[in-house]
Amino acid sequence: MNAIGVMALNEVRLRLRRRSTLVALLAAMALCWLGISDPADGVTMMMIDQKRVLYTSQALAFGSAHIAGMLLGLAGFYLVRGRVADDLQSGMGAVIGATGASNALLVAGRWLGGVAYLVLFVFAYLASTLALHALRGEGPIEVLVYLQTYLLMLLPIVSYAAACAVLFDNIGPLLGKRGDVLFFFLWCMQFGALVGVTESPGALWPMFLDFSGLSVAVTTLREHFATTSFVLGRSAFDPAGATLLFPASLWTLKAWGIRAATLSLSMLLLVPATLFFHRYSPDRVRPRSVRGNRLLALADRALRPVAVVLRPLPGLAMRVPGFAGEVLAEVALVLSMSPSAALVLAAGTVAAALAAPEVLPGVMTAGVAGWGMIVCGIAPRDWQSGADAMTAALPGGLARRYLRQWAASLVLALPLAIVALRWSLDAPLRAVAAVSGVLALASAASLLGGLTRGSRLFLALFLFTWYIALNTPKEAALDLVGFNGSANAATVSAWAIAGCLAWAAGFVHASRWRSA
């Protein structure tokens, strides 16, 4: 236990030093303050039977835990994972693999460190929520009520995110972006438990698999208030209408039992993590040769025509003078490193140009998701490949590199630009929303990639916002690039301003490091 404690403490210290921790915490706090709106503005966070729920400690604990659970279920995974890559890059992987510690000990220490790190994250988030309560609350601050709700709602999802991060890091083929994308789909599938509970009120098994706790929360509310009329999220209300008070003791013994079982299920993921632990063996943490893997060989043959088409791009970039040639070289490098990205770009361009007008929102929805996964790795690529110092020595230094990588991400948004161009004829505001959203996202990807030297923080926040936007089509502020058609002049301006600020912050950061 002493060895596990030392390992866990080391994991916490290493992760707290990352800039991604602060950025993710600020994003979680912003979501909390945005989701729990001020009732004085005529908007509330929760309605039950068309009645506004008063902002007591129990209600605010419930609402803030719901927001944190949604975000931590996705972002927590991306914040915890990545330690294997750090160990390989620093050379510590060989040392760890050669120690006499068992696989179970190493896995347990890393999981416990991830859980402790995310718990500290939750405590910082709780402090922000208590400050929000002091400003907008309608009752005394009951810290024990907050702790009880956070323990029941968030501990299983924290354990699940940390266990999945350890499991994916211990399986060689899931170390990279494939594991990141796979976990996103696993995170989305959890919300199917809420559908199962809604359609079959007596069913219990979906709640055991719902690590987010949303199905347990909805079932508890339904039992307390004997209704199925719930609105969780920002919604307008009549100030003169009736209000509702959350009970002092909301959580039942049944809810505690289900969440305890869910917590236990999350810890079972450590069993395969221990069995499949690669122990930093070079043949298990590095991509295997194409000859040794039939699936990779099949994929290589399928994408070979794409690679042939891309072959002239580097030569063309050398012949194009000035900054344009540098941007084209960045684009050629991105597409050459990932022929599948080139295939996605080509398919998206054809769909954007030929699809019927009524299909364009779907093309934009899928296109921005694929584009975000491609561009998230541009800014941190040089540092991760050990070429950071070399590219910084080129004319213009880091600041010019920042500009050409940002411009390359815009060039790769060609399918989105075509959709925006087609929208400009019939829905000019929607077209402007697409342009401002792409500029803001490209700036955010460059800023976060440069700050954190990784792609996972931007990917987590981007996919989370994209998923929430799909499920709240009427929320204008979340209409990223106009795919919902609900964006207005105010939200378009806000995204444009946010994009300009992100771009300026990224440029200043790059220039400062250049001078240092």
Image (tube, rainbow, N blue to C red):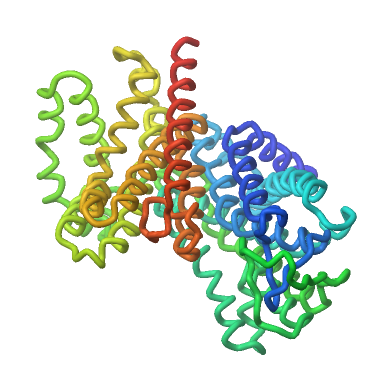
Of residue 490 and residue 5, the one placed in the foreground of this image is 490
Direction front: furthest residue: 240
Q: Is residue 378 visible?
A: yes
Q: Position of residue 39 (x, y in %)?
A: 71, 57
Q: State left or right for residue 228 relative to residue 167.
A: right
Q: State left or right for residue 477 relative to residue 135.
A: left
Q: State left or right for residue 506 relative to residue 207.
A: left
Q: Position of residue 80 (x, y in %)?
A: 59, 46
Q: State left or right for residue 202 relative to residue 281.
A: right
Q: Position of residue 183 (x, y in %)?
A: 49, 59
Q: Could you tell me how many numbered marks the image carries?
A: 0
Of residue 429 and residue 141, the one placed in the foreground of this image is 429
Q: Is residue 56 above or below residue 231?
A: above
Residue at 48% x, 63% y: name it. Answer: 474
Quarter residue 256 falls in: bottom right
Quarter residue 137 falls in: bottom right
Residue at 73% x, 68% y: name it. Answer: 52
Of residue 230 and residue 300, the one placed in the foreground of this image is 230
Of residue 179 and residue 509, the one placed in the foreground of this image is 509
Q: Is residue 102 visible?
A: no
Residue at 49% x, 39% y: name it. Answer: 85
Q: Position of residue 199 (x, y in %)?
A: 57, 86
Residue at 27% x, 44% y: name it. Answer: 413
Direction top: furthest residue: 515
